[in-house]
Amino acid sequence: MSELSFRNIDRIIEMAWEDRTTFEAIQFQFGLNEQDVISLMRREMKPSSFKMWRKRVQGRKTKHEKLRSFEKGRFKCSRQRQITSNNISKR
């Protein structure tokens, strides 16, 4: 995994939390595969937040392109609030 800026780490975390953003989209944009994203989330988040995210993401069909029931879709819901200046909790 290459050295990522604070802004890129923040964006990866934001994308990982979004339901319709696939791991493949994160890999395309930042070069991190699913396992790299999981490692980054584990490292950058509080343990309780990481566990909540993992529980939410496991088995979610929208996080994997091959499991999606639709071909094209937006990465983000139009009703979802924009996250700006997201503070990343450190352990």
Image (tube, helix red, strand yellow):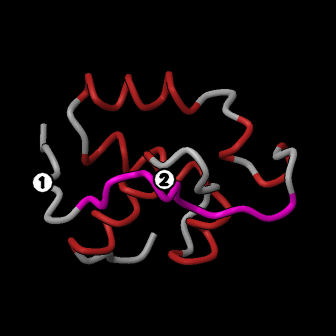
Q: Position of residue 35 (x, y in %)?
A: 57, 48
Q: Quadrant of residue 7?
A: bottom left
- For the residue marked with disc 2, what is the amino acid? Val
Front-most of residues 23 and 70: 70
Task: State the residue at coordinates (55%, 77%).
Answer: 29
Q: In the image, 17: left or right of 31?
A: left
Q: Secondary structure at mark 2?
A: helix
Q: Quadrant of the C terminus?
A: top left
- For the residue marked with disc 1, what is the amino acid? Asn
Report the predominant secondary structure element of the magenta stretch.
loop
- Residue that carries the numbered disc 1 in the rendered image: 87
Q: Position of residue 83 (x, y in %)?
A: 26, 59
Among numbered discs 1 and 2, the one appearing first in the sequence: 2
Was residue 14 drawn as part of the magenta stretch in this picture? no
Q: Position of residue 39 (x, y in %)?
A: 43, 46
Span colored in magenta: 71-83
- Residue that carries the numbered disc 2 in the rendered image: 37
Q: Secondary structure at mark 1?
A: loop
Task: State the residue at coordinates (61%, 68%).
Answer: 27
- Residue 82 vertical position relative to residue 4 in the rendered view, above or below: above
Was residue 77 drawn as part of the magenta stretch in this picture? yes
Task: State the residue at coordinates (21%, 71%).
Answer: 6
Q: In the image, 65: left or right of 7?
A: right
Tell me the crowding category of disc 2: few under 14, some 14 to 19, or many 20 or more residues within 10 angstroms, Cα based: many
Front-most of residues 60 and 82: 82
Front-most of residues 21 and 48: 21
Q: Quadrant of residue 60?
A: top right
- Residue 90 vertical position relative to residue 51 in the rendered view, above or below: below
> Between marks 1 and 2, how big is the CA–CA gap?
18 Å
Q: Residue furthest front?
A: 79
Q: Position of residue 71 (x, y in %)?
A: 87, 60
Q: Quadrant of residue 46?
A: top left
